[in-house]
Amino acid sequence: MSKITQIIKEARDQGRLTALDFAQGIFDDFIELHGDRNFRDDGAVIGGIGRLGDQTVTVVGIQKGKNLQDNLKRNFGQPHPEGYRKALRLMKQAEKFGRPVVTFINTAGAYPGVGAEERGQGEAIARNLMEMSDLKVPIIAIIIGEGGSGGALALAVADKVWMLENSIYAVLSPEGFASILWKDGSRAMEAAELMKITSHELLNMEIVDKVIPEHGFSNGELLANVKKELQEELKVLQALPLEDLLEQRYQRFRKY
């Protein structure tokens, strides 16, 4: 098995830590909040409030299931527009009360069904991109598994974007890339090599800011490491004047 194949397999592993695992394992007294106050609650997006050290933080994540029943409830980690609107509601609430935002991303992409499109999937993603670009609190986004297309980017317009070592981040799946380029989805791993979707490749291209090691660490140790990194980075971001924070976020994405 090639290295890229192994990384993709691990990124998609059903036993991988989920967004809810990170939320509950890192933040004390995490309370999950529900609903977009418009249509319904989307199980593919989790969000709430927790404590990181002595401060309150808003946490938002895209949630995959750990078995078939859970995945059906979570729509296999593919958010509907109401999921992105729930995320935005919580982020705007964080802005109102001066809370930093941390997002955990693991999705193959936003749900492409007819109902989702009828309820404004594209508009919901675009609004998140616009609102996050100017959100007046620090934002840290972490790719914890798959970071697929606009469905992932809708929660990744952040001051710092990190990836777990065995995660992937791309404009679309390798299978989709191969199907479009060669009309042959079986060439997915060949496509993955061309796409440069692994954490270290993206770090070298300055698409992401940090790679968090996974090899040799237990789940508990990984959670502790992410918690430590978050505490240190948020201190730096919160020390910046607001105008500098927003300008740096703007320039971070403009350079692409």
Image: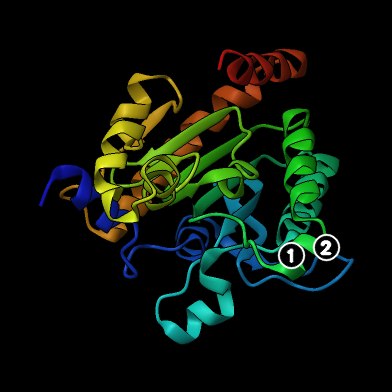
- Name the kind of residue labelled 2 in the image: Arg
Taking the spot 86% from the left edge, 42% from the top edge, the residue there is 96
Taking the spot 56% from the left edge, 37% from the top edge, the residue there is 140
Residue 215 screen position, x and y as percent: 18, 47
- Name the kind of residue labelled 1 in the image: Ala
Q: How many marks?
A: 2
Q: Could you tell whether 12 is left or right of 127 in the image?
A: left
Q: Is residue 169 above or below residue 220?
A: above
Are circles 1 and 2 on residues that touch, CB within 8 Å?
Answer: yes
Kind of element beneath mark 2 = loop
Residue designated by label 2: 119
Please indicate, yes or no, whether residue 54 appears anywhere in the rendered image: no
Q: CA distance from mark 1 to mark 2?
A: 5 Å
Residue 185 screen position, x and y as percent: 34, 54
Colouring convention used in this rendered image of the protein: rainbow
Taking the spot 73% from the left edge, 68% from the top edge, the residue there is 114
Please indicate, yes or no, whether residue 218 appears anywhere in the rendered image: yes
Closest to the observer: 112 or 241? 112
Kind of element beneath mark 1 = helix
Q: Quadrant of residue 191?
A: top left
Q: Is residue 81 above or below residue 68?
A: above
Residue 80 screen position, x and y as percent: 69, 64
Q: Could you tell whether 189 is left or right of 36 in the image?
A: left
Residue designated by label 1: 116
Q: Could you tell whether 51 is left or right of 215 in the image?
A: right
Q: Quadrant of the C terminus?
A: top right
Taking the spot 53% from the left edge, 65% from the top edge, the residue there is 77
